[in-house]
Image (cartoon, helix red, strand yellow):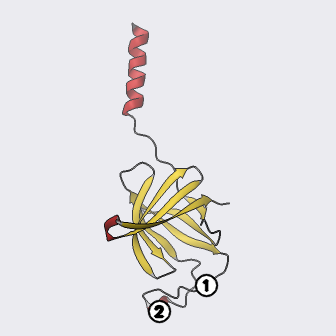
Amino acid sequence: MKFMFTTALAVAALVATPALAGDPTGVWMRSSGTGKIRIDNCGSALCGTVVWEQTPRKDTYNPDPAKRDRPVTGVRVLLGMKPSGTPDQWKGEVYNTDDGKTYTGYITLQGASTLKLQGCVLGGLICKSDTWNRSN
């Protein structure tokens, strides 16, 4: 009887314990292999910064004319990513250096070394995604 009671408590504890979220911090390579983004903790949220580009370029499409001559390397592209309520998913904003626009964004860990990035418009009706792999 004591064994059954202890086992029941252990099972109840496992069921009641929420799953720990994966850790998306680190350096990630875009699926195209043309850039790397470092995801860090930025206060109570996550942020991501371009740390390498195969072919360095300028932030030409930035809506702020004063920033259009800056290199894309060093630009923060993931902004204010906070847990979305879905396991291993964060929601915030994504700045797209290819068009200078900022979108509602999601990053979702799909495993220890794979991350899905989504940029969405119209309340999530239309989304574009990219799969990133952990990099060294």
Direction top: furthest residue: 1
The x, y position of residue 112, in whole percent, is 58, 49
- Disc 2: CA contacts within 10 A as few (<14), some (14-19) or many (>=20): few
Q: Residues within 10 Å of mark 1 (few under 14, many from 20)?
A: few
Q: Nearer the viewer, residue 55 or 44?
A: 55
Looking at the image, is mark 1 or mark 2 nearer the viewer? 1
Which amino acid, by three-letter code, is at mark 1?
Arg
Dot 2: element: helix
The label number, if any, that marks residue 135 in the structure image: none
Q: Is residue 44 visible?
A: no
Residue at 52 percent across and 56 percent down: it is 24
Callout 2, which amino acid? Ala
Q: Which mark is residue 57?
A: 1
Q: Residue at x 34, y 66 (%)?
A: 125
The image quarter in which residue 36 lies: bottom right
Q: Is residue 59 visible?
A: yes
Residue at 64% from the left image edge and 82% from the top image edge: 56
Tag 1–tag 2 contact (CB < 8 Å): no
Measured as percent of width and height from the top left, residue 73 is found at 59, 78
The answer for how far apart the CA atoms under marks 1 and 2 are is 16 Å
Q: Is residue 100 above or below residue 129?
A: below
The reply, left or right, for residue 69 in relation to residue 127 is right
Residue assigned mark 2: 66
User: In the rendered image, which quarter contains the N terminus?
Assistant: top left
Q: Position of residue 67 (x, y in %)?
A: 49, 88
| Residue 53 found in image quarter | bottom right
Provide residue 114's location: percent of width, then percent of height.
Answer: 57, 55
Q: Residue furthest left?
A: 123
Say which element carries label 1. Answer: loop
